[in-house]
Image (cartoon, helix red, strand yellow):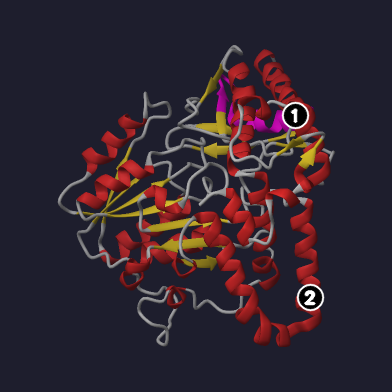
């Protein structure tokens, strides 16, 4: 499904997207050419036009959640006012009948699957909990995961380990693998005749490493093993559709790279597999193959959910290829310079196939806590500490509104810290 079709389904057209056009350069492209990602003049104008961020500091911690573009923020504010003004009459007579199906269709168009295969959740953690706890895992069943998976998901399978006696097998994925095949081999070698499920993170929140999910899923499928994909960070950051991952179960966040307000996630279950997931929340009325049987968790944060359509419009107008190219360019801009600074180690694979926006580093002889504090206190650059399995690093996460000037400030701070 291409962008021309997506724009059409959302009531837009290629001829009516001047919102993102600045001085003759429009993001209304079906592909990203190399020069566009480094066009600082354009991207600064783009940021000024579409984002309102604080000038008190430089935010390089966009991995927690994304800043809403102005059009999305405006829609969110309008949705709050509408729900407040029209109250339960709107909810009972309009939202579920009209708005909700349109929202699911917009998400289906972006993700490339059927609306009836999607469930809107409150975040990726909830989506993945529904999936992990919904599988019919029994005592002795083996679940493969790695130490750098998101801690909340690791805690969920540990809970099942204590509750029903499943067996957890952690694999160690190197921070700088030679290639994707090395990672594929690690997961493949871990599979036994007791393996029932593999939990795999598409793009790890700790270092930004992109995992070869499709290849892992394909191997697992051939052996009758289920794969649950944590795509919280990859969704709307890198170019793919859900079906490209060849996995039946996926959970994502909509408040990270998709740019929706905080409080919305998305779960995908392949249509014929819905019947195999037991509801985490009680529901006795929905059909066994109706994905809504998994979403009986009460009244939603309606203004947040309503805003998804506007976030989808912005995402489609920008285009995932130009977006991915720009984000990867920003990552490469600072990492290629930082790796040459004395005592600095980059803890993210820099190969384009293995990382995009997120990257992390450490400074020999200085704790990550001190690096983060000094960058914030002395250079007004906000980053975050991330705890790896056996190390602690500083994560840097630029977004579309960031410029190379911001990254120059980061580099200035790193260099000063190494000399102090």
Q: Mark 2 and mark 1: span between their CA atoms?
A: 38 Å
User: Would you say 214 lies left or right of 308 here?
Assistant: left
Find residue 331 and report its horizontal and vertical position in percent: 60, 29
Residue under label 2 = 82
The magenta region covers: 361-380
163, above or below 338, in the image:
below
Residue nearest the observer in this picture, 57 or 240: 240
Find residue 149 and report its horizontal and vertical position in percent: 43, 46
Q: Residue furthest left?
A: 193
Is 255 included in the stretch rendered in magenta? no
Residue nearest the observer in this picture, 48 or 265: 48
Question: Neighbour class for label 2 at 10 Å: few (<14), some, many (≥20)?
Answer: few
Q: Is residue 229 visible?
A: yes
Residue under label 1 = 406
User: Would you say 342 lies left or right of 68 here?
Assistant: left
State the residue at coordinates (46%, 31%): 353
State the residue at coordinates (41%, 53%): 243
Label 2 element class: helix
Find residue 231 and report its horizontal and vertical position in percent: 48, 50
Residue nearest the observer in this picture, 89 or 364: 89
For the C terminus, which image quadrant?
A: top right
């Amino acid at each position: 499904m291409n962008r021309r079709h997506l724009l059409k389904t959302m009531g837009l057209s290629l001829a009516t997207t001047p919102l993102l056009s600045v001085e003759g350069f429009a993001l209304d492209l079906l592909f990203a050419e190399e020069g566009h990602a480094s066009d600082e003049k354009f991207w600064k104008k783009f940021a000024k036009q579409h984002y309102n961020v604080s000038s008190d500091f430089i935010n390089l911690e966009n991995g927690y959640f994304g800043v809403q573009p102005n059009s999305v923020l405006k829609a969110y504010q309008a949705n709050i006012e509408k729900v407040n003004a029209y109250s339960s009459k709107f909810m009972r007579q309009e939202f579920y009948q009209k708005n909700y199906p349109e929202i699911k269709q917009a998400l289906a168009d972006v993700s490339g699957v059927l609306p009836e295969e999607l469930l809107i959740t409150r975040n990726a953690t909830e989506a993945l909990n529904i999936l992990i706890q919904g599988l019919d895992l029994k005592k002795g069943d083996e679940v493969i995961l790695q130490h750098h998976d998101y801690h909340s998901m690791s805690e969920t399978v540990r809970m099942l380990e204590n509750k029903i006696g499943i067996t957890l097998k952690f694999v160690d994925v190197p921070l700088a693998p030679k290639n994707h095949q090395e990672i594929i081999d690690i997961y493949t070698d871990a599979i036994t005749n007791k393996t029932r499920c593999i939990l795999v993170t598409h793009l790890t929140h700790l270092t930004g490493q992109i995992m070869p999910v499709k290849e892992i899923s394909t191997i697992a499928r051939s052996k009758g093993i289920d794969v649950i994909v944590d795509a919280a960070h990859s969704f709307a950051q890198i170019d793919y559709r859900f079906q490209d991952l060849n996995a039946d179960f996926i959970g994502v966040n909509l408040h990270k790279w998709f740019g929706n307000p905080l409080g919305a996630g998305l779960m995908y279950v392949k249509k014929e597999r819905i019947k195999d997931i037991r509801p985490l929340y009680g529901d006795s009325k929905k059909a066994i193959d109706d994905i809504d049987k998994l979403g009986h968790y009460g009244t939603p944060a309606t203004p947040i959910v309503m805003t998804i359509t506007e976030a989808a419009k912005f995402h489609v107008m920008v285009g995932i290829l130009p977006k991915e190219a720009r984000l990867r360019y920003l990552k490469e801009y600072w990492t290629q310079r930082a790796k040459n600074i004395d005592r600095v180690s980059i803890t993210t694979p820099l190969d384009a196939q293995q990382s995009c926006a997120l990257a992390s580093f450490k400074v020999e002889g200085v704790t990550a806590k001190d690096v983060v504090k000094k960058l914030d206190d002395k250079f007004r650059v906000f980053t975050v500490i991330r705890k790896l399995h056996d190390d602690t690093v500083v994560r840097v996460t630029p977004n579309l509104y960031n410029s190379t000037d911001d990254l120059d400030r980061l580099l200035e701070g790193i260099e000063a810290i190494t000399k102090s």
